[in-house]
Image: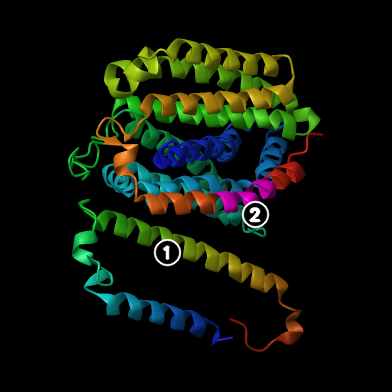
Amino acid sequence: VLCTPLGFVAIEAGWVVTEVGRQPWIVQGVLYTRDAVTPVRDLVVPLIAFTLLYLLLAAVTWRLLRKHVFATLPAPAAGGSDA
Amino acid sequence: MPELAHVVAAVVLVAMIAYVATGGADFGSGIWELFARGPRGALQVRALRGAIAPIWEANHVWLILVVVLLFVCFPTAFAAIMVALHVPVTILLFGIVLRGAAFVFQAYAEGDHAIERHAVRMFRIASTITPMALGVVAGAVAGGYVRVDAATGAVLDLGAARPWLAAFPLAVGLLTLALCAWLAAVYMTLAAPAELREDFRRRALLVGLAVGVIALPTAWLARREAPVLGEPLLGSWWSLPFHALTGVVAIGALAAVFTRRYGAARWLAIAQTALILGGWGAAQFPHVIAPDLELVRAAAPRVVLATTLAVLTVGSLLLVPAFFWLYRVFRAPR
């Protein structure tokens, strides 16, 4: 059970490598990232807003998932290691 | 042979009509949950949720189609709209995400009342704000509030608020909200169980009148504040017959609700939606962003347009029958 997240960690790690490895290009050999960035100012505002949004969604999902997992656990006889 | 760019633009317009007629009504159902009161309030909420639960995710396909077509086929215009209107577009995105998440959260709350209560409130608020934001974006683009450099196609920096925080875009936001509520109420006269029909009939009549009441000053505002749209919308050779037709269809839809001919009312309300959006499209043609950017000039290279149209044709062979059966299965009038 504890190993479940490892697959996701591997996917994310691979993604980070491709994104970082391609810099300074955003489209390899065609377009620099600095030329592709939006002219919109104060980008820190949407960055914080979207981070908070996804933290909220993650927290609620976590809480509901726990409820569903507990609801479907076999009777306490299973005992042992739950999360 | 028509310009490929114009063909793609026509597809975008049809997809927008489909989105308002289907997804717009989903927003409307969330709005009606806000007003679900009285002895049959809980029943109304259950009927509203039951009506949208099987279809609301599928309905967003139309918005995705609009966004992707703009992005692929009119990249200059897409960039200009997203940059100039990033505030209402972000609100729109937040609304869509929160609304979908909240709907799923309340459905799977499993007796977690705190989550359920918050999710339901979030769903209703997001259902109201999202169509407003959608209308504001549409009004800003239609009314010529997004300006681009006519030579390079680069968007002009007018600040974060000026391209949309004005009377006309906000009026279009309000009109969109009323239109969504109207469509939802009309559909519910068919989808709701018999004992709730009269409730939704009364609401449909009220908000149907509101659509007309909001549309008139919005048209006046278009002429005064947004002549780029107002002049062609109200001053073309087709204006008078077109708006007369829209008015007749709108009154016909209201009359059909009044006389309890709900099946006809649904089709008339859809036709009314198509005419309102079609009028916008006709007034804006041949521009993608009036008055600076024409469809042909903003379009991607011909090979991209041709490929996209070919893919669309093949894709719609799958999509259209799938949608037909989806609505057929879940919306069969009883």
Q: Residue at x 67, y 31 (%)?
A: B187
In the rendered image, is residue A9 in sight?
A: yes
**In the rendered image, which residue does mark 1 sit on?**
A55
The residue marked by circle 1 belongs to what chain? A
Please tell me whether residue B180 is drawn above or below residue B298 in the rendered image.
above
- Could you tell me residue B182's position as x and y percent? 58, 27
- Could you tell me residue B270's position as x and y percent? 60, 28
CA distance separating discs 2 and 1? 20 Å
Q: Which residues lie in the magenta part?
A: B313-323
Question: Is B264 a magenta residue?
Answer: no
Badge 1 local density, few (<14 within 10 Å), some, or many (20+)? few
In the rendered image, is residue B54 in sight?
A: no
Q: Kindly identify the amino acid type of the residue bearing the numbered disc 2.
A: Ala
- Could you tell me residue B254's position as x and y percent? 63, 16
Farthest front residue in view: B1
Main SS category, magenta section: helix
Q: Quadrant of residue B197?
A: top right
Residue B107 image label: 2
Badge 2 local density, few (<14 within 10 Å), some, or many (20+)? some
The residue marked by circle 2 belongs to what chain? B
**Are tags 2 and 1 found on a single chain?**
no
Seen in the image, is B147 located left or right of residue B171? left
Q: Residue at x 28, y 76 (%)?
A: A22
Q: Kindly identify the amino acid type of the residue bearing the numbered disc 1.
A: Leu
Secondary structure at numbered mark 2? helix
